[in-house]
Image (spheres, grey):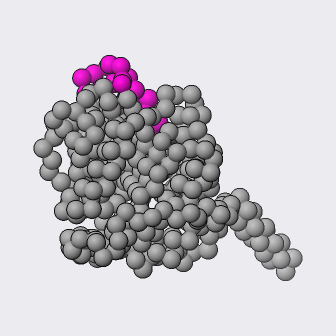
Amino acid sequence: MQIAIAIAILIVLATLYLAYSYRAPNLSQYDLPRAPLVIEEQEVSDAHNEVVSRIQAFIAASDDKASITIQRQNMEELMESAVPATIMPVDVNGIPGEWVIADGANPGKRLLYLHGGGFRLGSPKSHRHITYELSKRAGVAVLAVDYRMQPEYKTVACHEDARKAYRWVLEHGPNGPEPIESLYIAGDSAGGNLSLSVIAWARDAGVRPAEAVVAFAPVTDLTMTNPSWRSNIPTDPFLGPLITPLSKLPRWVLALVTRNTTGKPINHPEISPLLGNLANLPPTLIQVSRDEVLFDDAQRYANRANHQGSDVELNVWPKLVHVFQAFKELPESGAALQLAADFITAR
């Protein structure tokens, strides 16, 4: 009897410790001000309905039991786009990557692109629509890297590779080792997380800062405590079905489970950049849909960073799917990528 009581006490203490160790601060004060919408909901194109249907079919056909190789192939088939760019495979200090260079792009002006895909899926190939459009519209040479991912590696490996690529691109262009004129960083979703994390690392490590940063619907807080992680599940056809099972877990259980895949506590600033020091960062543009799960991640990051003195601009669209910029058939994609290019070229 005494042994059972002791075990129960230990379980309670362990639960309290986990709940305390992996807690996230209350950042609700950064819910305001709300950024205005770029367009009104009635202005969203009819093509968006077709993209939603494609995504829903992709989700319905997804098989969690399929090999990670098959899952990645399926993701590429959903998002792959043929582009009229020069594609140059490259070894980025041991990391596979590719240069995406549109006609007229300046090899001295380089953009490091970190793709999304939940730290598990995605590749430079799946995100070529975005990388090509940024190269064409901003006149930059884009380096996209195929960083290590789960389940083969933990999330910290993704961050390690992002930092390694950051250092590499400062000294290497499409033509080999050569000085850099301007550095830009961009990424979407999980890649947006890597982008916002790596600029904070560069600041703290004394590494040359980027001239500008663009994050499309970034994950900024993996504790999943921002309200839209739950409230926007019904309105997010891409991430909603994937988040639903996780949203039903107690937060401490979620923290414990994800700790095994991340390699660090999910409230660590490297994993959740919203929770870190956001002062003295490069000018940053964030784009997000008001109706997606990651809306509050974007809104709170922008407000908190601006509060700490950094320059962060937030573009918000109504209704659009997560990382709508990746779907070339959407007029909103072109408009958003042009805003991103304008932000880059202005700096």
Residue at 32 percent across and 19 percent down: it is 178
Residue 280, quarter of the rendered image: top right
Horizontal and vertical percent position of residue 255:
60, 63
Count the numbered circles shown.
Answer: 0
Residue located farthest toward the right when viewing the structure as drawn: 2
Position above or below: 154 against 67: above
Horizontal and vertical percent position of residue 75:
27, 60
Residue at 45 percent across and 34 percent down: it is 210
Horizontal and vertical percent position of residue 144:
31, 41
Position of the N terminus by quadrant: bottom right
Horizontal and vertical percent position of residue 109:
32, 30
Residue at 49 percent across and 59 percent down: it is 298
Q: Which residues are magenta?
A: 159-181
Q: 246 and 63: which one is in front?
A: 246
Q: Is residue 308 left or right of residue 45?
A: right
Residue at 12 percent across and 44 percent down: it is 84
Q: Is residue 165 magenta?
A: yes
Q: 190 and 5: which one is in front?
A: 190
The answer to whether residue 202 is visible is yes
Position of the C terminus by quadrant: top left
Position above or below: 254 against 60: above
Q: Is residue 34 magenta?
A: no
The answer to whether residue 119 is visible is no
Residue located farthest toward the top when viewing the structure as drawn: 178
